[in-house]
Amino acid sequence: MAMIEFQDVHKSFGALEVLKGIDATVGKGEVVCIIGPSGSGKSTMLRCVNGLEDYQKGRVLVEGQVVDRNKKSIREVRMEVAMVFQRFNLFPHRTVLENVIEGPVYVKGENRASAIERGRALLERVGLAAKADNHPQQLSGGQQQRVAIARALAMQPRAILFDEPTSALDPELVGEVLTVMRDLAKEGMTMLIVTHEIAFAREVADRVLFIDGGVIVEQGPPSEVLVRPRHPRTQDFLHRVLHPID
Amino acid sequence: MSSFLQDMINFLPALMKGIQLTLIVTVGSIIFSTVLGLVWAIMRLSSNRVLSLTSATIVNILRAIPILVQLFYIYFVMPELGLALTALQAAIIGLGIAYSSYQAEDFRAGIEAVDHGQTEAAQSIGMSRGLMMRRVILPQAIKIILPSYGNTMIMMLKDSSLASTITVAELSLQGKLIASSTFKNTAVFTAVALLYLVMCLPLMGLSRWLEKRMGRRR
């Protein structure tokens, strides 16, 4: 069974249709990158998976279970599928460690001491053990995003959604976040990533989806979609991303 | 001048009884209006249209009726409907209900001012609405609400004098009683005014201290 599955998903904001029939799957342990121009519906597609957006037609399935943001079951989906946001969205009134253990302790009811132990180990893993007692605003963007990844991992999710995780970062801080994500991919975490980092997608993704105008224009392994794109819209987009001042 | 001061000092013990009632009414109605205001605000922000509309209607009605009239209603009309309250109870409940509408609007504005990304982050880790409010939104909203909350506390301290109209012998009524029996209007009301000022100062200090303390975190 696929980890995440989109079946003919349609989504409109009022009169504006942003997803026009999306079909896609993410298998267990697979890393799938979604690329495409801004406004193409990539983030919306991602946000349908954990019910931050609803959709009007079709189905989104997580491990075979239909995602419906208006049902109680949405909370179970969210505990299984974590999310990392473009703007980090850490809790500013809590320390780094408190951010990481918030979900395990207050949502899952995990014992506080064991959550703290796991939380510290996770911070160690993203290279921020020393910052455990700081508040998020004392950290750089790259550090904050790594805390956000630790917070996602603390939920022991079956998959993680990344919504342009490096787009709000200064260029010199992008690498540290991508390194953490690359390690996760190697360890077999299922990841669905909206990104503009073409080089990263080429290296890490098992599959790439190119989406434009609310439809998937082209999908396949990065060696095809990113290196020898077949569709002219993909070729045009990649050219503009890779050679912005030509 | 010295007899003026002497008069003020002589009236102090009697005025102190009034202060006691002023403080009871103020603290009681602040607590009551805060709890009730929070209920209105959370109802108002609910996705349930019935709850939200109910809250909006109640808040607008309360805001449109003078506090004095609300007090009269609770003290004089309620007994006819079979609910008799003591003057003190009526004052606390009346002021509490009246001010809950202003509190509700402040709370709602504060809650809405918290970055929407916080809501999404809370939802993304599976939080229920209640847990999200308690652990994520309200702690951040408090910081935004605090300045207007401090202001409301001061207004409520002063408006506790409205309780005099339903026979609660708080500070202002106590002053009026002393004045009318001694004819020393200047000494009495100067003392009353100064006592209100003295009670307000710690409240102003408290709200500034809280703002500073909460502000340091961000």
Image (tube, coloured by chain):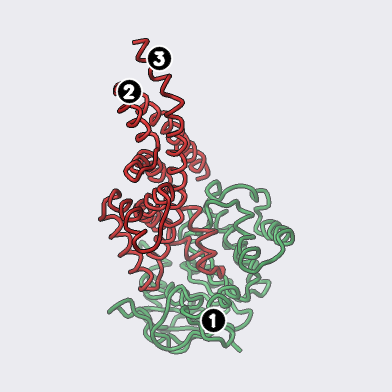
* Rendered view: A181 above or below A80: above
Q: Which residue is mark 1?
A: A221
Q: Left or right of A115: which side holds B139?
A: left
Other residues around mark 1 within 10 Å, as few (<14) / some (14–19) / many (≥20):
some
| Circle 2 SS class | helix
Q: Position of residue A198 (x, y in %)?
A: 49, 69
Identify the residue at horizontal 37%, vertical 64% (top origin).
Answer: B44
Label 3: chain? B
* Rendered view: B109 above or below A105: above
Chain coloured red in the rendered structure:
B
Q: Position of residue A229 (x, y in %)?
A: 44, 80
Q: What is the C-alpha distance between the residues marked 2 and 1?
A: 96 Å
Give amino acid for label 1: Pro
Of the numbered discs 2 and 3, the one sitting upstream in the chain is: 3
Cβ–Cβ below 8 Å for labels 2 and 1?
Answer: no
The nearer-to-camera label among 2 and 3 is 2
Q: What is the C-alpha distance between the residues marked 3 and 1?
A: 94 Å
Checking the image for residue B171, the label placed there is: none
Q: What is the C-alpha distance between the residues marked 2 and 3?
A: 14 Å
Identify the residue at horizontal 46%, vertical 47% (top origin).
Answer: B28
Q: Position of residue A152 (x, y in %)?
A: 60, 66
Q: Which residue is mark 3?
A: B6
| Circle 3 SS class | helix
Chain coloured green in the rendered structure:
A
Instruction: Establish whether labels 2 and 1 are both on one chain.
Output: no
Q: Which residue is mark 2?
A: B182
